[in-house]
């Protein structure tokens, strides 16, 4: 063995590394050997934050538990765990075990005393609303390590969020978790771990494995090396069939059998639906499809004053406000451009960053919007849902909010039926359509540029430790972003209608 390969074989493993290997060997190799780390995106930061909060709550609900600290080092954690397991007089949090160089920390380990001796219940806490397939692999790794440390295991469960839970009074979180008992599902997988660990060590000691990109790059996790791997592969088709909306991936697979990869090469008798046929034509000719007459006809009964509306929402794994549920969307901001028949625009907005329940403030401001005229949103189901939920939660504005919900119409299908620019790349999100019509209104100049950024900004601004100056800066960024969304709708509509 060379010096380099002996160094490589000494890398420790953990359940997350085994899980990365199961997704893709190259992903784990890159995680271990790559010098550059990719940036953690907004949604990953949100899910880390949710995971920590859920883990803390799960521990707080187990009485008399004791935490095994990872400090000063993991050797101390292993020794402390061994002491606590020997005494077996209370639940242990982050109990730490090692077998064959694989280190695991168990979220919650609970002893059960019987005449035949002590057995242990394993609980792995997850912030998801159910036990996922990859959780089973994680649990199997833990089971394999712990059982090989001589600990008798009575049960193994994923403790996950019950999304039907409703917070009935402040701090009343009993019942927020469900346990999915998985001992019978994991023992077979655990039996494969020994061989897998050997395979992983061999892989890590060698050169970077070659793995083609594919659907596995997105599930169960979006791989952080996708730009790197795509850059290593030969350039694909310029306008791939997979870009066709809804069924593109399936069509790409089907036509690959005939060596057809480009949208423009799809034959006349390919049986494309009208939208796909329109996209093919736009890709083939490079010409923009726009049916202004169709836009005007579809929107002729959208009465003035037109209210162009957009919400920003926050969803916590652990609900903060009475009447809300895990991952329930709670609006904390809206922007509305109110347009009169002569084209005059007024901007109305509300933003609640105190950290208190924002529903009342937002409902109050919404109730002040005009009580007639069409309410226009992009992908309007979301705005309609927000309005109905607010109507339910803030009864004093129920009628005004339900009226807004009933008057809500959708600009997205109007665009979908009457417009296509090939640079949309098959997407009808407002962020895909806007730059093809109004590049000057793009979001590139904004600090908050999408819904994920907006949620992170909300969390930072509502932290009691956030300095006033920073909070004001975040508020300005949020207002600029939400306002841009509704102004973009107005201007997109004007372009589509030929105005
Ligand atoms: S992008 Fe795909 S192929 Fe590349 S390391 Fe990640 S999962 Fe593997």
Image (tube, rainbow, N blue to C red):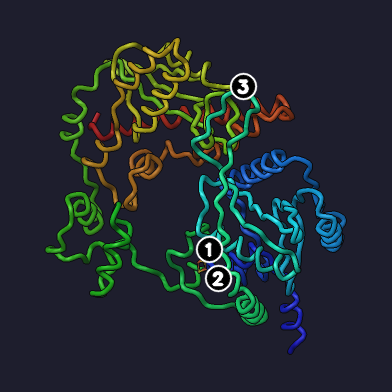
Q: Residues within 10 Å of mark 3 (few under 14, many from 20)?
A: few
**Residue 37 versus residue 168 in the image, above or below:** below
Q: Which residue is mark 1?
A: 185
The mark closer to the camera, 3 or 2, is: 2
Q: Quadrant of the C terminus?
A: top left
Element assignment for label 1: helix
Whether residue 446 is visible to the viewer of this picture, yes or no, is no
Q: Residues within 10 Å of mark 1 (few under 14, many from 20)?
A: some
Q: Residues within 10 Å of mark 2 (few under 14, many from 20)?
A: few
Q: Residue at x 65, y 27 (%)?
A: 171
- In the image, farthest residue toward the front: 115
Q: Which residue is mark 3?
A: 356
**Rendered location of residue 269, percent (x, y):** 12, 63
The mark closer to the camera, 1 or 3, is: 1
**Rendered location of residue 259, percent (x, y):** 26, 75
In front of the other: 310 or 115: 115
Q: Residue at x 61, y 58 (%)?
A: 38
Q: Residue at x 64, y 77 (%)?
A: 194
Tag 1 near tag 2, CB within 8 Å:
yes
Q: Work out how far the residue at label 3 is from the one at label 2, CA to CA, in angstroms.
A: 48 Å
Among the 4 quarters of the image, the one containing residue 251: bottom left
Q: Work out how far the residue at label 1 is from the one at label 2, CA to CA, in angstroms.
A: 7 Å
């Amino acid at each position: 063995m060379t010096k380099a390969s002996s160094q490589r074989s000494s890398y420790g493993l953990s359940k997350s590394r085994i899980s990365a290997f199961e997704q893709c060997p190259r992903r784990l190799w890159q995680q271990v050997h790559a010098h550059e780390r990719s940036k953690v995106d907004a949604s990953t930061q949100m899910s880390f934050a949710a995971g920590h909060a859920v883990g803390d709550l799960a521990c707080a609900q187990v009485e008399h538990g004791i935490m095994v600290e990872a400090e000063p080092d993991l050797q101390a954690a292993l020794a402390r765990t061994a002491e606590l397991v020997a005494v077996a007089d209370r639940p242990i949090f982050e109990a730490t075990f090692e077998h064959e160089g694989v280190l695991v920390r168990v979220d919650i380990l609970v002893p059960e005393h019987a005449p035949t001796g002590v057995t242990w219940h394993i609980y792995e806490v997850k912030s998801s609303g159910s036990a996922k397939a990859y959780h089973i692999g994680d649990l199997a790794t833990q089971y394999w390590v712990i059982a090989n440390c001589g600990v008798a295991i009575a049960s193994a469960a994923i403790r996950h969020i019950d999304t039907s839970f409703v917070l009935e009074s402040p701090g009343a979180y009993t019942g927020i978790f469900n346990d999915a008992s998985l001992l019978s599902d994991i023992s077979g997988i655990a039996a494969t771990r020994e061989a897998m660990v050997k395979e992983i060590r061999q892989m890590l000691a060698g050169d970077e494995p070659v793995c083609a990109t594919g659907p596995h790059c997105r599930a169960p996790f979006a791989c952080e090396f996708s730009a790197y791997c795509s850059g290593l592969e030969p350039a694909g088709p310029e306008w791939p069939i997979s870009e066709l909306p809804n069924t593109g991936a399936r069509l790409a697979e089907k036509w690959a059998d005939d060596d057809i990869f480009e949208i423009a090469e799809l034959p006349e008798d390919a049986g494309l639906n009208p939208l796909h046929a329109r996209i093919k034509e736009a890709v083939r000719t490079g010409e923009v499809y726009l049916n202004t007459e169709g836009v005007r006809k579809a929107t002729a009964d959208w009465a003035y004053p037109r209210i162009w509306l957009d919400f920003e929402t926050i969803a916590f794994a652990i609900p903060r406000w009475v009447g809300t549920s895990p991952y329930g969307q709670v609006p904390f901001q809206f922007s509305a451009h109110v347009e009169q028949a002569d084209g005059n625009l007024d901007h109305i907005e509300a933003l609640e960053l105190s950290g208190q329940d924002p529903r009342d403030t937002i409902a109050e401001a919404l109730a002040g919007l005009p009580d007639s005229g069409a309410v226009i949103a992009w992908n309007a189901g979301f705005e309609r849902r927000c309005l109905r939920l607010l109507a339910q939660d803030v009864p004093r504005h129920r009628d005004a909010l339900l009226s807004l919900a009933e008057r809500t119409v959708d600009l997205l299908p109007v665009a979908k039926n009457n417009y296509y620019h090939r640079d949309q790349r098959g997407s009808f999100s407002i962020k895909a359509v806007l730059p093809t019509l109004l590049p000057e209104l793009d979001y590139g100049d904004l600090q908050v540029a999408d819904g994920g950024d907006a949620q992170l900004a909300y969390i930072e601004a509502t932290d009691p430790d956030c300095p006033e100056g920073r909070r004001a800066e975040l508020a300005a960024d949020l207002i600029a972003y939400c306002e841009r969304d509704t102004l973009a709708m107005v201007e997109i509509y004007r372009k589509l209608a030929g105005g």
